[in-house]
Structures are given as structure tokens and as C-alpha cells.
Amino acid sequence: MRDGNLQTVFTVDLFNEGVDVPAIDVVLMLRPTESATVFLQQLGRGLRRSANKDVLTVLDFVGHQSAKFRFDPRYRKMLGRTRRELERDIEQDFPYLPAGCRLELDPVARDIVLDNVRNALPTTWRARVQELRDLGDVSLAEYLHESGLEREDLYANGRSWTQLRRSAGRILAPAGDDEERIGRGIGRLLHVDDQDRLDAYRRLLSHREPPVPAHLEPNTRRQLEGLLLTILSPRKGAYESLNTAAAELWRHSALRDELVELLPLLEDQVIHLHRPLALPAAVPLQIHATYTREEILGAFGASTVTSPLPLQTGVYWHEPTQTDLFLITLQKTERDYSPTTRYLDYAISDRLFHWESQAITSVASTTGQRYLNHEKRGTHVVLFIRRAKVDANGRTMPYFCAGTASYVEHRAERPIQVTWRLHDPLPGDTFADYRAAVA
């Protein structure tokens, strides 16, 4: 095969892996498999780089043998995308691939795959309820596996696992007051992607009785604040103490049980190395983890369930820790941002970040001078970045903790255009995502 004397080899479960012939430039798929891993192993026979080989042609005849066959697991495994993101990628010819890579589907094949992705899963609430009735009293993990749904699909439109189980007759006890409202908040935790927070939330929620805040370590207490701020989304004055807010969640035992089931399923999102945010005062945040605005402000003690901070800007000066917090959205739409607040923020490299101050902040202002001279004054700058305000499902996106940064240079007067040097380089996948977001 390497020399070209043999043009074609047909195998059955023989050369799925372990065969390295880089010159192979056509792969013919004839074996049906529901295993995305087997598919990638087979595809990998042709993905080796070789001289005079510019492209791999894949002729995939699998999928027509059964109306229930699904294409989405193999593409999601290959691209690392959710099902909803995959649908958009197929429509737009896969715009988020790494530099130097491209994936092109024949137009007819693209329509077949796209139609399959859209119709393979129970998309309506009624269909999902019926699927749970058919499956029986299964766990959350089993339901997601058997139905093929993403976690994001299940929690779309403010739904919850508890609500689905109740609709399917799996929970017979009547719903408590505000169960639906509080249940909507569980979907706001799907971003959690660091082991420290997963373990902390699990320890807090594993007890049948709510924790006593006075008995908690300061960091754990602030993590509890962030958890409750995110789920309960309280108005000012809604709770007289952290104790009463915790008791409100614990009163809904089905929702607490749901959280205990959900958190272990989020461990597959722990893909980056994390370490504590380096500030003089202890703040329970991890570099290169993602957080809601409420978790960030709760970690700094700036927002509490008794007095939530309605932050409307992307900057916040935290006096107790002498820290400027920058909450940055890369893609700023006309609907969500006025012309005077659509600042030009983008990653220059994995270490350098271009950021614009608010239009009212000048170089000569007190705030501007603090930004530009923060190292001399002993103050700190922390960047939290998100690609867009909402994701493909319309949910508010969390912020990625890029960590502390140092001033490099600035230009312009109002707004100030500042280049920051991140003390920890952005992970490769995150940098690629940010670069694509502003391309």
C-alpha cells in the first residue's frame, strides 16, 4: 500500500487501530457502529500526514441501514462540540476548526447529516416525558445516555430533571412552593468545570440538613454564597440571612437530590489544569475555570444572598482586596450593547490581551491612573472573559477566569486601549475559541 502496488484493502474489525500507513488518502466506511470511539479509530487510519497528501477523502456509506442511526455522536466526538453547536457547525461549514484544518461535506451528505442530527432525538417536552416513562425510574445519567440528549438539551427553557420526573409520574409528592422557579436555576450550574468547586458543592449538598454558615470555613462560605446566588437569583431583601437562603434550597429535597446527581456528570468538563487565583486575600476561584457573575462576586464577598450586587458594567473595583475585576464579553451585539459600550476586546496571543476601558475613563482620571500604575501601587487586575453574552441555546454564558494580569502599554485617551500580559497563558483551545470569536 505504501508503494502503491496494492490500492485497496477491505477488513472487518481487523485494522481499526494499530496500523500506520500514512499514505492512505481514502477511507471507505461500510461497517455500522454506534461507537464514536470505533469510528474515530477507523477514521484515524487515514489521518496521518504524508508527503503529497493534502486531503483525506472519506466515503461513508453507513447510516442508511437503520432509521434510528445517529450521526451526531461521531461528529461530536471528533470535534468536541455539543449537539446544538454541531448543528450550527454543519450549517456554517465547520467554522471553528483549528488553524490549518478543514472539514467539507458533500452538499447532499451535509443535508442528510443535518437532517439526522435535528431529528434523531426527542426534541419536544412531551416526547422527553414519554421517553422517561418508557425507560422507567432511571437515574439522570442513565436517562441522558439512553435518550442521547445533552445536559444542555434537558435544561433548556428553564426545565429541570425534577420537573421531567414529576411530569412522567416518577415523583408523586406534590411540588413545593417555588420549586419551578428554583429548579430553573439548576441549569445555570452546567458550566462548572473545576474539581475544587465540584467537590465543595457536593460536600455542601450531600447532607440532608442545610449547612450552618457560621461553622463553615471562609472560602467554603463564599462558595455557598456563589452557589445560592446562581441558583436562587435573589432580589435584595428576599432573604434575611445566608441561613434562610440555604434553608430555602434544602426545603426542596427533590431539587437538592437532583443537584447531587448532576454534579458528578460535570466532571467530564474538567479539562484544564487549575490553581487558586493568586491574590493576597483568599478568594475561592480557580484560574482557567468558568464562573457565573454571581459566583465571581460571591467569591470576593462583594455580593451576598442578603444583598446581591446588581452589577451592570464590565468593571468592578474591589476595595478590600485592592483588585480591579474586568468582566469581558468578546462578541458585542447591537441588541445588547450600545455603540458607546461596544469596546474592542480581543486576545492578541495566549499571553497578551487587548482591552478598552469604559468611555468615561480617561488616562488622567483616578481610575485610569490606577489601571496604568497598578504594579507600583500594589493593586491587582483580574480578567474574566466570555465569548458572547448568550450561547446558542439563549442561556447567559459564564466567564472564563483568565487570572491576574500586568500592564504592558496603552494607547488613546478615552477609552484607554490597554494591552495586558496574563500571568498564566490561555489554554490552546480557549485561545482558539477567542480568536475565532472576533475573527
Image (spheres, rainbow, N blue to C red):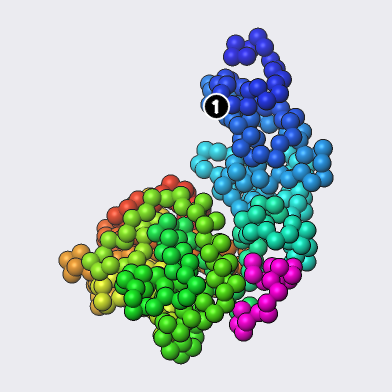
Q: Which amino acid, mark 1?
A: Arg
Relative horizontal placement of residue 387, taking residue 180 as reference (left or right): left
Relative horizontal placement of residue 46, taking residue 98 as reference (left or right): right
Residue at 68% over, 77% down: 173
Q: Quadrant of residue 358?
A: bottom left
Residue at 39% over, 74% down: 298
Residue 389 can be seen in this image: yes
Residue 192 in picture, x, y percent from top left: 48, 61
Residue 124 in picture, x, y percent from top left: 76, 64
Residue matched to label 1: 48
Q: Is residue 176 magenta?
A: yes
Label 1 secondary element: loop
Compared to residue 207, the image places residue 119 above or below, namely above
Residue at 46% over, 49% down: 271
Residue 292 in picture, x, y percent from top left: 46, 68
Which residues, given as a range, are shown in magenta? Answer: 161-179
- Quadrant containing the N terminus is top right
Residue 330 can be seen in this image: no
